[in-house]
Image (cartoon, rainbow, N blue to C red):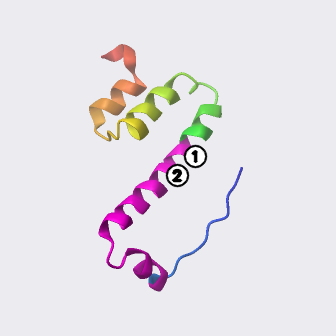
Amino acid sequence: MRRAVTNLGPKAVRQVTAGAPRKAASFTKSVAATILGEFFDVLQAEEGFEEVTPRLRKVVLEDGVFAEPSIRAALFPDAS
């Protein structure tokens, strides 16, 4: 499933972020979580990634960890 992407120009971005750094950070996090969520959905459908994807999704989206050791442990649980 593809979604339409709208192009926000610099003026629109300034309007979204002006005077609300906390809102901007939340907006950015929401966008990133949406993109990563869609990536994990596609990855889950790929052959050979059925077992890895739920662990990787948990580490990245639920725990919010992007450190290499955590991601490596999610990808290769038997190597720990």
> What amino acid is at disc 1?
Glu
User: For mark 1, what is the residue?
Assistant: 38
Query: Depth check: 59 or 47 in front?
Result: 59
Tell me the SS state at disc 1: helix
Q: Residue at the location (45% across, 26% down)?
A: 55
User: How would you classify the magenta stretch by its main secondary structure?
Assistant: helix
- Percent across and percent down for residue 22 are 31, 64
Residue at left 58%, top 36%? Answer: 43
Question: Does the stretch in magenta take in 30?
Answer: yes
**Residue at screen point 60% across, 39% down:** 41
Q: Which residues are magenta?
A: 11-39
Label 2 with label 1: CB-CB less than 8 Å: yes
Residue 40 in picture, x, y percent from top left: 54, 39
Residue that carries the numbered disc 2 in the rendered image: 35
Crowd around label 1: few <14 · some 14–19 · many ≥20 (10 Å): some
- Decide: is 39 above or below 30: above
Vertically, is 32 above or below 65?
below
From mark 2 to mark 1, how far is it between C-alphas? Answer: 5 Å
At label 2, the amino acid type is Ile
Was residue 48 drawn as part of the magenta stretch in this picture?
A: no
Q: Dividing the picture into quarters, in which one does residue 79 lie?
A: top left
Dot 2 crowding, Cα within 10 Å, few <14, some 14–19, many 20+: few
Question: Picture quarter containing residue 42?
Answer: top right
